[in-house]
Image (cartoon, coloured by chain):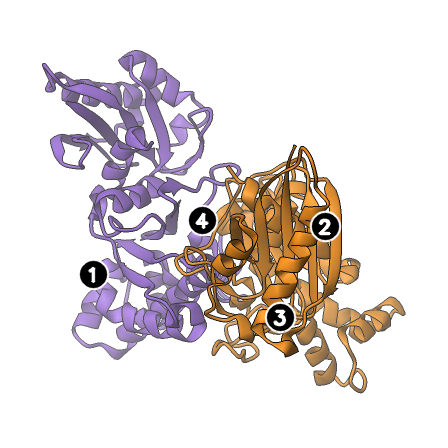
Chain colours: A orange, B purple
Amino acid sequence: MKYTIGVDLGGTNLRAASFTPEGQIIHRLSGKTTLSEGRDRVVHDIVHFIEEIRDQHQGDYQLAGVGIGVPGFIRIKEGVIAGSNNLKVLENFPMRDAISEKLGTPVILENDANAAAMGECWMGAGKDVDDLVLLTLGTGIGGGIIVDGRIVHGMTGMAGEIGHITVHPEGNPCGCGNRGCLEKHASATAITALARLIQLGENLTAADVYDLALSGDPRALQIFESVGRALGIAIGNMINLLNFPLYLLSGGPLPAWDFFAPAMMAEIKTRSFTFRHTNTRVERATLGNLAGLYGAAYLPLIP
Amino acid sequence: MKYTIGVDLGGTNLRAASFTPEGQIIHRLSGKTTLSEGRDRVVHDIVHFIEEIRDQHQGDYQLAGVGIGVPGFIRIKEGVIAGSNNLKVLENFPMRDAISEKLGTPVILENDANAAAMGECWMGAGKDVDDLVLLTLGTGIGGGIIVDGRIVHGMTGMAGEIGHITVHPEGNPCGCGNRGCLEKHASATAITALARLIQLGENLTAADVYDLALSGDPRALQIFESVGRALGIAIGNMINLLNFPLYLLSGGPLPAWDFFAPAMMAEIKTRSFTFRHTNTRVERATLGNLAGLYGAAYLPLIP
Protein backbone atom coordinates (compact mmCIF):
# COMPACT_ATOMS: atom_id res chain seq x y z
CA MET A 1 0.00 0.00 0.00
CA LYS A 2 1.31 3.38 -1.06
CA TYR A 3 1.61 6.19 1.49
CA THR A 4 3.11 9.67 1.63
CA ILE A 5 4.70 11.84 4.32
CA GLY A 6 4.15 15.55 4.84
CA VAL A 7 6.23 17.86 7.01
CA ASP A 8 5.23 21.35 8.12
CA LEU A 9 8.26 23.25 9.35
CA GLY A 10 7.38 26.56 11.01
CA GLY A 11 9.43 29.05 12.97
CA THR A 12 8.00 27.55 16.17
CA ASN A 13 6.44 24.17 15.43
CA LEU A 14 7.49 21.09 13.53
CA ARG A 15 4.78 18.71 12.41
CA ALA A 16 4.93 15.55 10.35
CA ALA A 17 2.39 12.94 9.35
CA SER A 18 1.91 10.04 7.01
CA PHE A 19 -1.19 9.86 4.82
CA THR A 20 -2.93 7.36 2.61
CA PRO A 21 -3.24 8.41 -1.06
CA GLU A 22 -6.90 9.06 -0.22
CA GLY A 23 -5.90 11.72 2.32
CA GLN A 24 -6.39 9.89 5.61
CA ILE A 25 -3.78 10.54 8.31
CA ILE A 26 -2.01 7.34 9.40
CA HIS A 27 0.62 8.50 11.91
CA ARG A 28 1.29 11.97 13.19
CA LEU A 29 4.08 13.63 15.20
CA SER A 30 4.60 17.15 16.44
CA GLY A 31 7.27 19.06 18.31
CA LYS A 32 9.17 22.30 18.47
CA THR A 33 11.53 23.78 15.89
CA THR A 34 14.92 24.19 17.56
CA LEU A 35 16.38 27.03 15.54
CA SER A 36 18.67 28.20 18.35
CA GLU A 37 20.86 25.13 17.90
CA GLY A 38 21.49 25.86 14.24
CA ARG A 39 20.81 24.43 10.85
CA ASP A 40 22.08 20.90 11.32
CA ARG A 41 19.87 20.39 14.34
CA VAL A 42 16.77 21.47 12.41
CA VAL A 43 17.64 19.18 9.52
CA HIS A 44 18.37 16.35 11.96
CA ASP A 45 15.00 16.85 13.68
CA ILE A 46 13.16 16.75 10.37
CA VAL A 47 14.94 13.60 9.26
CA HIS A 48 14.37 12.00 12.64
CA PHE A 49 10.64 12.77 12.53
CA ILE A 50 10.32 11.29 9.07
CA GLU A 51 12.29 8.17 10.02
CA GLU A 52 10.20 7.69 13.10
CA ILE A 53 7.02 7.80 11.04
CA ARG A 54 8.50 5.64 8.31
CA ASP A 55 9.49 3.00 10.81
CA GLN A 56 5.88 2.57 11.77
CA HIS A 57 5.01 1.47 8.24
CA GLN A 58 6.24 -2.09 8.03
CA GLY A 59 5.37 -4.81 5.57
CA ASP A 60 3.32 -3.87 2.58
CA TYR A 61 3.73 -0.07 2.86
CA GLN A 62 5.56 1.80 0.12
CA LEU A 63 6.61 5.45 0.58
CA ALA A 64 5.73 7.65 -2.43
CA GLY A 65 7.87 10.53 -1.19
CA VAL A 66 8.15 13.34 1.32
CA GLY A 67 6.83 16.88 0.97
CA ILE A 68 8.07 19.66 3.23
CA GLY A 69 6.35 23.02 3.64
CA VAL A 70 8.44 25.94 4.94
CA PRO A 71 7.79 29.66 5.38
CA GLY A 72 9.86 31.50 2.76
CA PHE A 73 10.57 31.83 -0.92
CA ILE A 74 11.73 28.59 -2.49
CA ARG A 75 13.88 28.10 -5.56
CA ILE A 76 11.82 25.12 -6.62
CA LYS A 77 14.17 23.58 -9.16
CA GLU A 78 17.07 23.63 -6.70
CA GLY A 79 15.06 22.78 -3.58
CA VAL A 80 16.56 25.69 -1.69
CA ILE A 81 15.05 28.33 0.60
CA ALA A 82 16.01 31.62 -1.09
CA GLY A 83 14.73 33.78 1.75
CA SER A 84 12.81 33.28 4.98
CA ASN A 85 12.23 35.68 7.86
CA ASN A 86 11.49 32.81 10.23
CA LEU A 87 14.13 30.33 9.13
CA LYS A 88 17.16 32.48 8.39
CA VAL A 89 19.54 29.63 9.30
CA LEU A 90 18.21 27.55 6.42
CA GLU A 91 18.59 30.17 3.68
CA ASN A 92 20.58 29.15 0.61
CA PHE A 93 21.24 25.68 2.01
CA PRO A 94 20.50 22.72 -0.33
CA MET A 95 17.93 21.49 2.12
CA ARG A 96 15.87 19.28 -0.19
CA ASP A 97 18.87 17.28 -1.38
CA ALA A 98 20.43 17.07 2.09
CA ILE A 99 17.28 15.54 3.54
CA SER A 100 16.66 13.38 0.51
CA GLU A 101 20.16 11.86 0.74
CA LYS A 102 19.85 11.14 4.43
CA LEU A 103 16.50 9.42 3.87
CA GLY A 104 17.14 7.79 0.51
CA THR A 105 13.73 9.05 -0.58
CA PRO A 106 12.57 11.78 -3.00
CA VAL A 107 11.81 15.06 -1.19
CA ILE A 108 9.86 18.09 -2.44
CA LEU A 109 10.34 21.48 -0.80
CA GLU A 110 7.47 23.96 -1.01
CA ASN A 111 6.39 27.31 0.41
CA ASP A 112 4.03 26.76 3.36
CA ALA A 113 1.19 28.95 2.04
CA ASN A 114 1.37 27.17 -1.32
CA ALA A 115 1.31 23.86 0.51
CA ALA A 116 -1.71 25.00 2.53
CA ALA A 117 -3.54 25.99 -0.67
CA MET A 118 -2.74 22.57 -2.13
CA GLY A 119 -3.91 20.91 1.09
CA GLU A 120 -7.27 22.69 0.96
CA CYS A 121 -7.58 21.68 -2.70
CA TRP A 122 -6.80 18.07 -1.89
CA MET A 123 -8.81 17.41 1.27
CA GLY A 124 -10.26 20.72 2.49
CA ALA A 125 -12.79 23.30 1.36
CA GLY A 126 -11.51 23.04 -2.22
CA LYS A 127 -11.92 19.29 -2.66
CA ASP A 128 -14.38 19.75 -5.49
CA VAL A 129 -12.45 22.33 -7.55
CA ASP A 130 -9.17 22.48 -9.48
CA ASP A 131 -8.62 26.24 -9.24
CA LEU A 132 -8.55 28.26 -6.04
CA VAL A 133 -6.81 30.99 -4.11
CA LEU A 134 -6.04 30.65 -0.40
CA LEU A 135 -5.40 33.76 1.69
CA THR A 136 -3.58 33.13 4.97
CA LEU A 137 -4.26 35.89 7.48
CA GLY A 138 -1.78 36.34 10.30
CA THR A 139 0.98 38.74 11.26
CA GLY A 140 1.15 39.32 7.53
CA ILE A 141 -1.02 38.01 4.71
CA GLY A 142 0.22 35.31 2.39
CA GLY A 143 -1.41 32.99 -0.01
CA GLY A 144 -1.28 30.28 -2.58
CA ILE A 145 -2.78 29.92 -6.03
CA ILE A 146 -3.83 26.60 -7.53
CA VAL A 147 -4.52 26.38 -11.27
CA ASP A 148 -5.71 23.10 -12.73
CA GLY A 149 -4.70 21.24 -9.57
CA ARG A 150 -1.16 22.62 -9.60
CA ILE A 151 0.60 25.29 -7.55
CA VAL A 152 1.42 28.53 -9.40
CA HIS A 153 5.02 29.28 -8.43
CA GLY A 154 5.76 32.11 -10.81
CA MET A 155 9.19 32.82 -12.20
CA THR A 156 11.09 32.83 -8.89
CA GLY A 157 8.71 31.12 -6.47
CA MET A 158 7.25 34.46 -5.37
CA ALA A 159 3.70 34.01 -6.67
CA GLY A 160 0.87 34.43 -4.18
CA GLU A 161 2.11 37.56 -2.41
CA ILE A 162 -1.51 38.52 -1.87
CA GLY A 163 -0.63 40.59 1.19
CA HIS A 164 1.05 43.10 -1.07
CA ILE A 165 -1.84 43.76 -3.40
CA THR A 166 -2.49 47.51 -3.25
CA VAL A 167 -5.97 48.10 -1.83
CA HIS A 168 -5.60 51.79 -0.94
CA PRO A 169 -3.09 53.55 -3.24
CA GLU A 170 -2.49 56.27 -0.63
CA GLY A 171 -2.87 53.92 2.33
CA ASN A 172 -0.59 52.81 5.14
CA PRO A 173 3.13 52.50 4.33
CA CYS A 174 4.38 48.92 4.15
CA GLY A 175 7.82 47.47 4.84
CA CYS A 176 7.90 46.32 1.20
CA GLY A 177 8.19 49.93 0.03
CA ASN A 178 4.57 50.26 -1.12
CA ARG A 179 1.61 52.05 0.47
CA GLY A 180 -1.79 50.54 1.12
CA CYS A 181 -0.82 46.88 0.88
CA LEU A 182 -3.62 44.50 1.85
CA GLU A 183 -1.64 43.27 4.84
CA LYS A 184 -1.35 46.82 6.16
CA HIS A 185 -5.15 46.99 6.23
CA ALA A 186 -6.33 43.46 7.00
CA SER A 187 -3.72 41.37 8.88
CA ALA A 188 -3.71 40.75 12.63
CA THR A 189 -0.96 43.38 12.79
CA ALA A 190 -3.21 45.83 10.95
CA ILE A 191 -6.01 45.15 13.43
CA THR A 192 -3.79 46.04 16.39
CA ALA A 193 -2.45 49.10 14.53
CA LEU A 194 -5.98 50.30 13.79
CA ALA A 195 -6.92 49.80 17.46
CA ARG A 196 -3.92 51.89 18.50
CA LEU A 197 -4.77 54.56 15.92
CA ILE A 198 -8.30 55.07 17.21
CA GLN A 199 -7.11 54.67 20.83
CA LEU A 200 -9.36 51.72 21.47
CA GLY A 201 -7.20 50.68 24.44
CA GLU A 202 -3.65 50.06 25.63
CA ASN A 203 -1.58 47.40 23.86
CA LEU A 204 -4.53 45.50 22.47
CA THR A 205 -3.88 42.31 20.51
CA ALA A 206 -6.04 41.33 17.55
CA ALA A 207 -7.68 38.80 19.89
CA ASP A 208 -8.50 41.61 22.35
CA VAL A 209 -10.11 43.60 19.54
CA TYR A 210 -12.10 40.50 18.66
CA ASP A 211 -13.29 40.19 22.27
CA LEU A 212 -14.35 43.84 22.24
CA ALA A 213 -16.26 43.24 18.99
CA LEU A 214 -17.93 40.25 20.63
CA SER A 215 -19.04 42.51 23.47
CA GLY A 216 -20.58 44.85 20.89
CA ASP A 217 -18.00 47.66 21.04
CA PRO A 218 -18.87 49.79 17.99
CA ARG A 219 -15.29 50.91 17.36
CA ALA A 220 -13.99 47.34 17.44
CA LEU A 221 -16.76 46.42 15.01
CA GLN A 222 -15.66 49.31 12.79
CA ILE A 223 -12.13 47.93 12.69
CA PHE A 224 -13.37 44.59 11.39
CA GLU A 225 -15.56 46.36 8.85
CA SER A 226 -12.51 48.19 7.59
CA VAL A 227 -10.60 44.89 7.46
CA GLY A 228 -13.50 43.37 5.50
CA ARG A 229 -13.51 46.21 2.98
CA ALA A 230 -9.77 45.84 2.34
CA LEU A 231 -10.15 42.07 1.89
CA GLY A 232 -13.12 42.67 -0.40
CA ILE A 233 -11.13 44.98 -2.69
CA ALA A 234 -8.30 42.45 -3.00
CA ILE A 235 -10.57 39.44 -3.48
CA GLY A 236 -12.75 41.36 -5.95
CA ASN A 237 -9.62 42.09 -7.98
CA MET A 238 -8.63 38.44 -7.98
CA ILE A 239 -12.11 37.34 -9.04
CA ASN A 240 -12.05 39.81 -11.95
CA LEU A 241 -8.61 38.66 -12.95
CA LEU A 242 -8.94 34.90 -12.47
CA ASN A 243 -12.63 33.94 -12.47
CA PHE A 244 -11.80 31.02 -10.16
CA PRO A 245 -14.66 29.18 -8.45
CA LEU A 246 -13.22 29.46 -4.92
CA TYR A 247 -11.34 31.91 -2.69
CA LEU A 248 -10.53 30.68 0.81
CA LEU A 249 -9.43 32.47 3.95
CA SER A 250 -7.55 30.94 6.86
CA GLY A 251 -5.51 32.02 9.86
CA GLY A 252 -5.77 33.65 13.25
CA PRO A 253 -8.40 36.31 12.49
CA LEU A 254 -10.79 33.72 11.05
CA PRO A 255 -12.97 33.47 14.21
CA ALA A 256 -13.86 37.12 13.52
CA TRP A 257 -15.45 36.03 10.20
CA ASP A 258 -18.91 37.23 11.24
CA PHE A 259 -17.49 40.68 11.97
CA PHE A 260 -15.49 41.21 8.77
CA ALA A 261 -17.25 38.98 6.23
CA PRO A 262 -20.40 41.12 5.69
CA ALA A 263 -18.32 44.19 4.70
CA MET A 264 -16.01 41.95 2.64
CA MET A 265 -18.85 40.34 0.72
CA ALA A 266 -20.55 43.70 0.13
CA GLU A 267 -17.33 45.09 -1.28
CA ILE A 268 -16.83 42.05 -3.53
CA LYS A 269 -20.40 42.34 -4.83
CA THR A 270 -19.88 46.00 -5.72
CA ARG A 271 -16.47 45.55 -7.25
CA SER A 272 -16.87 42.36 -9.25
CA PHE A 273 -19.55 41.83 -11.86
CA THR A 274 -17.95 38.41 -12.40
CA PHE A 275 -18.87 37.60 -8.79
CA ARG A 276 -22.42 38.81 -9.29
CA HIS A 277 -22.88 36.73 -12.46
CA THR A 278 -21.33 33.46 -11.30
CA ASN A 279 -21.39 31.03 -8.39
CA THR A 280 -18.03 32.21 -7.11
CA ARG A 281 -17.52 31.10 -3.50
CA VAL A 282 -15.60 33.08 -0.87
CA GLU A 283 -15.35 30.87 2.19
CA ARG A 284 -13.44 29.80 5.26
CA ALA A 285 -10.74 27.19 4.72
CA THR A 286 -11.53 24.01 6.64
CA LEU A 287 -8.20 22.33 7.47
CA GLY A 288 -7.02 25.03 9.89
CA ASN A 289 -3.32 24.81 10.75
CA LEU A 290 -3.13 21.31 9.30
CA ALA A 291 -3.64 22.57 5.73
CA GLY A 292 0.11 22.91 5.14
CA LEU A 293 0.74 19.41 6.43
CA TYR A 294 -1.91 17.96 4.12
CA GLY A 295 -0.59 19.92 1.16
CA ALA A 296 3.02 18.94 1.82
CA ALA A 297 2.00 15.28 1.96
CA TYR A 298 0.11 15.59 -1.31
CA LEU A 299 3.10 17.00 -3.23
CA PRO A 300 4.68 13.59 -3.99
CA LEU A 301 1.31 12.34 -5.25
CA ILE A 302 0.67 15.10 -7.83
CA PRO A 303 0.58 13.38 -11.22
CA MET B 1 2.66 19.15 -44.29
CA LYS B 2 0.47 20.19 -41.37
CA TYR B 3 -1.06 23.67 -41.29
CA THR B 4 -3.60 25.54 -39.19
CA ILE B 5 -6.15 28.29 -39.83
CA GLY B 6 -6.90 31.22 -37.55
CA VAL B 7 -9.87 33.56 -37.77
CA ASP B 8 -10.21 36.90 -36.01
CA LEU B 9 -13.83 38.02 -35.99
CA GLY B 10 -14.30 41.58 -34.76
CA GLY B 11 -17.29 43.88 -34.70
CA THR B 12 -15.89 45.60 -37.83
CA ASN B 13 -13.25 43.40 -39.43
CA LEU B 14 -13.00 39.75 -40.34
CA ARG B 15 -9.52 38.29 -40.83
CA ALA B 16 -8.36 34.79 -41.56
CA ALA B 17 -5.01 33.22 -42.31
CA SER B 18 -3.31 29.87 -42.60
CA PHE B 19 -0.05 29.24 -40.75
CA THR B 20 2.68 26.66 -40.68
CA PRO B 21 3.15 24.91 -37.30
CA GLU B 22 6.24 27.11 -36.96
CA GLY B 23 4.11 30.25 -37.06
CA GLN B 24 4.70 31.50 -40.60
CA ILE B 25 1.67 32.94 -42.39
CA ILE B 26 0.89 31.05 -45.62
CA HIS B 27 -2.28 32.69 -46.95
CA ARG B 28 -4.20 35.60 -45.56
CA LEU B 29 -7.62 37.17 -46.21
CA SER B 30 -9.39 40.13 -44.71
CA GLY B 31 -12.77 41.80 -45.12
CA LYS B 32 -15.61 43.41 -43.24
CA THR B 33 -17.94 41.82 -40.69
CA THR B 34 -21.47 42.16 -42.07
CA LEU B 35 -23.48 42.14 -38.88
CA SER B 36 -26.38 44.10 -40.36
CA GLU B 37 -27.41 41.10 -42.45
CA GLY B 38 -27.73 38.84 -39.45
CA ARG B 39 -26.16 35.78 -37.92
CA ASP B 40 -26.31 33.43 -40.88
CA ARG B 41 -24.48 35.88 -43.07
CA VAL B 42 -21.65 36.24 -40.54
CA VAL B 43 -21.34 32.47 -40.20
CA HIS B 44 -21.46 32.11 -43.99
CA ASP B 45 -18.68 34.69 -44.39
CA ILE B 46 -16.45 32.92 -41.86
CA VAL B 47 -16.98 29.54 -43.50
CA HIS B 48 -16.40 31.05 -46.92
CA PHE B 49 -13.11 32.66 -45.82
CA ILE B 50 -11.86 29.41 -44.34
CA GLU B 51 -12.86 27.41 -47.41
CA GLU B 52 -11.15 29.91 -49.66
CA ILE B 53 -7.93 29.58 -47.70
CA ARG B 54 -8.24 25.81 -47.43
CA ASP B 55 -8.68 25.52 -51.20
CA GLN B 56 -5.28 27.05 -51.67
CA HIS B 57 -3.62 24.18 -49.79
CA GLN B 58 -3.62 21.34 -52.26
CA GLY B 59 -1.60 18.17 -52.28
CA ASP B 60 0.41 17.38 -49.22
CA TYR B 61 -1.22 19.89 -46.87
CA GLN B 62 -3.19 18.62 -43.88
CA LEU B 63 -5.38 20.96 -41.84
CA ALA B 64 -4.85 20.59 -38.06
CA GLY B 65 -7.96 22.62 -37.25
CA VAL B 66 -9.47 26.07 -37.12
CA GLY B 67 -9.31 28.55 -34.24
CA ILE B 68 -11.68 31.52 -34.10
CA GLY B 69 -11.19 34.52 -31.81
CA VAL B 70 -14.26 36.62 -31.02
CA PRO B 71 -14.89 39.56 -28.68
CA GLY B 72 -17.07 38.27 -25.84
CA PHE B 73 -17.36 35.71 -23.07
CA ILE B 74 -17.18 32.16 -24.38
CA ARG B 75 -18.65 29.04 -22.84
CA ILE B 76 -15.62 27.03 -23.87
CA LYS B 77 -17.00 23.52 -23.44
CA GLU B 78 -20.07 24.35 -25.53
CA GLY B 79 -18.30 26.58 -28.05
CA VAL B 80 -20.92 29.30 -27.58
CA ILE B 81 -20.63 33.07 -27.17
CA ALA B 82 -22.36 33.73 -23.85
CA GLY B 83 -22.26 37.49 -24.19
CA SER B 84 -20.73 40.01 -26.58
CA ASN B 85 -21.36 43.74 -26.89
CA ASN B 86 -20.06 43.76 -30.46
CA LEU B 87 -21.57 40.54 -31.73
CA LYS B 88 -25.00 40.45 -30.12
CA VAL B 89 -26.45 38.48 -33.05
CA LEU B 90 -24.14 35.57 -32.27
CA GLU B 91 -24.96 35.24 -28.57
CA ASN B 92 -26.09 31.83 -27.37
CA PHE B 93 -25.78 30.34 -30.85
CA PRO B 94 -23.84 27.03 -31.15
CA MET B 95 -21.35 28.77 -33.38
CA ARG B 96 -18.41 26.40 -33.02
CA ASP B 97 -20.42 23.33 -33.95
CA ALA B 98 -22.29 25.08 -36.77
CA ILE B 99 -19.02 26.11 -38.42
CA SER B 100 -17.32 22.81 -37.68
CA GLU B 101 -20.17 20.88 -39.36
CA LYS B 102 -20.16 23.06 -42.45
CA LEU B 103 -16.38 22.62 -42.79
CA GLY B 104 -16.00 19.03 -41.61
CA THR B 105 -13.07 20.21 -39.49
CA PRO B 106 -12.53 20.67 -35.74
CA VAL B 107 -13.12 24.29 -34.65
CA ILE B 108 -12.09 26.01 -31.41
CA LEU B 109 -13.85 29.18 -30.29
CA GLU B 110 -11.91 31.56 -28.04
CA ASN B 111 -12.16 35.06 -26.59
CA ASP B 112 -10.18 37.50 -28.74
CA ALA B 113 -8.04 38.91 -25.91
CA ASN B 114 -7.18 35.38 -24.78
CA ALA B 115 -6.30 34.52 -28.37
CA ALA B 116 -4.11 37.63 -28.60
CA ALA B 117 -2.28 36.64 -25.39
CA MET B 118 -1.74 33.16 -26.84
CA GLY B 119 -0.53 34.69 -30.11
CA GLU B 120 2.06 36.83 -28.32
CA CYS B 121 3.17 33.75 -26.39
CA TRP B 122 3.48 31.72 -29.59
CA MET B 123 5.14 34.13 -32.00
CA GLY B 124 5.29 37.58 -30.39
CA ALA B 125 6.99 39.28 -27.45
CA GLY B 126 6.34 36.21 -25.26
CA LYS B 127 7.98 33.61 -27.50
CA ASP B 128 10.54 32.75 -24.84
CA VAL B 129 8.18 32.37 -21.85
CA ASP B 130 5.31 30.07 -20.82
CA ASP B 131 3.56 32.49 -18.46
CA LEU B 132 2.41 35.99 -19.35
CA VAL B 133 -0.37 38.52 -19.05
CA LEU B 134 -1.47 40.63 -22.02
CA LEU B 135 -3.36 43.88 -21.43
CA THR B 136 -5.30 45.16 -24.43
CA LEU B 137 -5.88 48.90 -24.20
CA GLY B 138 -8.72 50.36 -26.25
CA THR B 139 -12.21 51.69 -25.63
CA GLY B 140 -12.06 49.45 -22.60
CA ILE B 141 -9.24 47.32 -21.23
CA GLY B 142 -9.21 43.56 -21.61
CA GLY B 143 -6.61 40.93 -21.30
CA GLY B 144 -5.53 37.36 -21.37
CA ILE B 145 -3.54 35.21 -18.97
CA ILE B 146 -1.28 32.38 -20.07
CA VAL B 147 -0.05 29.86 -17.47
CA ASP B 148 2.30 27.13 -18.55
CA GLY B 149 1.52 27.78 -22.21
CA ARG B 150 -2.23 27.52 -21.72
CA ILE B 151 -5.02 30.08 -21.56
CA VAL B 152 -6.57 30.63 -18.12
CA HIS B 153 -10.32 30.65 -18.77
CA GLY B 154 -11.61 30.58 -15.25
CA MET B 155 -14.85 28.98 -14.21
CA THR B 156 -17.09 30.66 -16.81
CA GLY B 157 -14.63 32.00 -19.39
CA MET B 158 -14.50 35.38 -17.66
CA ALA B 159 -10.84 35.34 -16.56
CA GLY B 160 -8.66 38.24 -17.65
CA GLU B 161 -11.05 41.10 -16.91
CA ILE B 162 -8.04 43.25 -16.14
CA GLY B 163 -9.94 46.44 -17.00
CA HIS B 164 -12.02 45.94 -13.89
CA ILE B 165 -9.21 45.68 -11.37
CA THR B 166 -9.81 48.42 -8.80
CA VAL B 167 -6.94 50.90 -8.92
CA HIS B 168 -8.59 53.79 -7.06
CA PRO B 169 -11.20 52.51 -4.55
CA GLU B 170 -13.01 55.87 -4.60
CA GLY B 171 -12.28 56.53 -8.27
CA ASN B 172 -14.44 57.05 -11.33
CA PRO B 173 -17.71 55.11 -11.46
CA CYS B 174 -17.71 52.25 -13.99
CA GLY B 175 -20.56 50.70 -15.95
CA CYS B 176 -19.78 47.40 -14.18
CA GLY B 177 -21.05 48.82 -10.87
CA ASN B 178 -17.62 49.41 -9.36
CA ARG B 179 -15.64 52.61 -8.84
CA GLY B 180 -12.04 53.18 -9.88
CA CYS B 181 -11.73 50.33 -12.39
CA LEU B 182 -8.48 50.37 -14.34
CA GLU B 183 -10.34 51.00 -17.59
CA LYS B 184 -11.94 54.13 -16.11
CA HIS B 185 -8.43 55.50 -15.53
CA ALA B 186 -6.32 54.13 -18.36
CA SER B 187 -8.33 53.25 -21.47
CA ALA B 188 -8.65 55.43 -24.58
CA THR B 189 -12.09 56.36 -23.24
CA ALA B 190 -10.52 57.40 -19.94
CA ILE B 191 -8.00 59.57 -21.79
CA THR B 192 -10.77 61.49 -23.57
CA ALA B 193 -12.76 61.75 -20.34
CA LEU B 194 -9.73 63.15 -18.49
CA ALA B 195 -9.18 65.66 -21.32
CA ARG B 196 -12.80 66.76 -21.01
CA LEU B 197 -12.53 67.00 -17.23
CA ILE B 198 -9.55 69.35 -17.31
CA GLN B 199 -11.02 71.23 -20.31
CA LEU B 200 -8.06 70.49 -22.51
CA GLY B 201 -10.13 71.17 -25.64
CA GLU B 202 -13.43 70.47 -27.40
CA ASN B 203 -14.29 66.85 -28.24
CA LEU B 204 -10.73 65.60 -28.18
CA THR B 205 -10.07 61.97 -29.07
CA ALA B 206 -7.31 59.98 -27.37
CA ALA B 207 -5.27 60.48 -30.56
CA ASP B 208 -5.75 64.26 -30.24
CA VAL B 209 -4.49 64.13 -26.66
CA TYR B 210 -1.51 62.14 -27.90
CA ASP B 211 -0.79 64.83 -30.53
CA LEU B 212 -0.96 67.51 -27.83
CA ALA B 213 1.47 65.49 -25.69
CA LEU B 214 3.79 65.23 -28.70
CA SER B 215 3.70 69.00 -28.99
CA GLY B 216 4.73 69.21 -25.34
CA ASP B 217 1.39 70.32 -23.84
CA PRO B 218 1.94 69.85 -20.07
CA ARG B 219 -1.70 68.99 -19.33
CA ALA B 220 -1.76 66.33 -22.03
CA LEU B 221 1.45 64.94 -20.58
CA GLN B 222 -0.21 64.93 -17.16
CA ILE B 223 -3.07 62.84 -18.53
CA PHE B 224 -0.65 60.17 -19.74
CA GLU B 225 1.16 60.24 -16.41
CA SER B 226 -2.10 59.58 -14.66
CA VAL B 227 -2.82 56.74 -17.11
CA GLY B 228 0.64 55.34 -16.38
CA ARG B 229 0.08 55.43 -12.62
CA ALA B 230 -3.21 53.55 -12.95
CA LEU B 231 -1.59 50.92 -15.18
CA GLY B 232 1.31 50.66 -12.73
CA ILE B 233 -0.98 49.94 -9.79
CA ALA B 234 -2.79 47.19 -11.70
CA ILE B 235 0.36 45.64 -13.15
CA GLY B 236 2.14 45.86 -9.77
CA ASN B 237 -0.77 43.92 -8.25
CA MET B 238 -0.52 41.25 -10.91
CA ILE B 239 3.24 40.93 -10.45
CA ASN B 240 2.78 40.49 -6.68
CA LEU B 241 0.05 37.95 -7.24
CA LEU B 242 1.50 35.95 -10.13
CA ASN B 243 5.28 36.52 -10.31
CA PHE B 244 5.14 35.97 -14.07
CA PRO B 245 8.18 36.89 -16.17
CA LEU B 246 6.26 39.04 -18.67
CA TYR B 247 3.41 41.56 -18.80
CA LEU B 248 2.56 42.93 -22.26
CA LEU B 249 0.53 45.91 -23.38
CA SER B 250 -1.13 46.33 -26.76
CA GLY B 251 -3.79 48.45 -28.42
CA GLY B 252 -4.55 51.93 -29.67
CA PRO B 253 -2.81 54.00 -26.93
CA LEU B 254 0.48 52.09 -27.38
CA PRO B 255 2.17 54.81 -29.50
CA ALA B 256 1.92 56.97 -26.36
CA TRP B 257 4.21 54.49 -24.54
CA ASP B 258 6.92 57.09 -23.98
CA PHE B 259 4.38 59.35 -22.29
CA PHE B 260 2.77 56.84 -19.92
CA ALA B 261 5.49 54.21 -19.43
CA PRO B 262 7.82 56.23 -17.13
CA ALA B 263 5.01 56.84 -14.60
CA MET B 264 3.84 53.24 -15.01
CA MET B 265 7.29 51.78 -14.37
CA ALA B 266 7.88 54.10 -11.39
CA GLU B 267 4.60 52.98 -9.87
CA ILE B 268 5.40 49.30 -10.45
CA LYS B 269 8.83 49.72 -8.85
CA THR B 270 7.29 51.31 -5.75
CA ARG B 271 4.45 48.86 -5.44
CA SER B 272 6.12 45.55 -6.17
CA PHE B 273 9.17 44.25 -4.33
CA THR B 274 8.83 41.17 -6.54
CA PHE B 275 9.45 43.42 -9.54
CA ARG B 276 12.46 45.00 -7.86
CA HIS B 277 13.99 41.62 -7.01
CA THR B 278 13.43 39.80 -10.30
CA ASN B 279 13.87 40.27 -14.03
CA THR B 280 10.17 40.85 -14.57
CA ARG B 281 9.56 42.48 -17.96
CA VAL B 282 6.77 44.95 -18.72
CA GLU B 283 6.83 45.57 -22.46
CA ARG B 284 4.97 46.37 -25.63
CA ALA B 285 3.36 43.45 -27.42
CA THR B 286 4.85 42.99 -30.87
CA LEU B 287 2.17 41.41 -33.07
CA GLY B 288 -0.14 44.45 -33.07
CA ASN B 289 -3.64 43.73 -34.33
CA LEU B 290 -2.52 40.39 -35.75
CA ALA B 291 -1.96 38.89 -32.28
CA GLY B 292 -5.51 37.52 -32.13
CA LEU B 293 -5.13 35.93 -35.56
CA TYR B 294 -1.88 34.24 -34.56
CA GLY B 295 -3.34 33.03 -31.28
CA ALA B 296 -6.50 31.69 -32.92
CA ALA B 297 -4.39 29.76 -35.41
CA TYR B 298 -2.29 28.30 -32.61
CA LEU B 299 -5.28 26.93 -30.69
CA PRO B 300 -5.56 23.68 -32.74
CA LEU B 301 -1.83 23.09 -32.24
CA ILE B 302 -1.78 23.29 -28.42
CA PRO B 303 -0.67 19.87 -27.19
Q: Could you tell me how far apart the alpha carbons at marks 2 and 4 are, in whole angstroms?
A: 31 Å
Amino acid type of the residue that numbered disc 2 sits on in the rendered structure: Leu
Numbered tag placed on residue A287 in the rendering:
2
Q: Could you tell me how far apart the alpha carbons at marks 2 and 1 are, in whole angstroms?
A: 50 Å
Label 4, secondary structure: give it. Answer: loop
Which residue lies at the image location 48% right of the left edge and 76% below the top edge? A178
Which residue lies at the image location 75% right of the left edge and 47% below the top edge? A27
Task: Give x and y (percent) for residue B163.
Answer: 42, 54
Circle 2 or circle 1, nearest the eye: 2
Numbered tag placed on residue B161 in the rendering:
4
Total numbered labels: 4
Which part of the image, by quadrant, shows the N terminus of chain A? top right
Amino acid type of the residue that numbered disc 1 sits on in the rendered structure: Pro
Label 2, secondary structure: give it. Answer: loop
Sequence-wise, the earlier of marks 4 and 1 is 4
Same chain, labels 2 and 1: no
Amino acid type of the residue that numbered disc 3 sits on in the rendered structure: Arg
Task: Give x and y (percent) for residue B98.
Answer: 36, 16
Q: Could you tell me how far apart the alpha carbons at marks 2 and 3 are, in whole angstroms?
A: 29 Å
- Dot 3 corresponds to which residue? A41
Circle 3 or circle 4, nearest the eye: 3
Task: Give x and y (percent) for residue A13.
Answer: 70, 66
- Dot 1 corresponds to which residue? B255
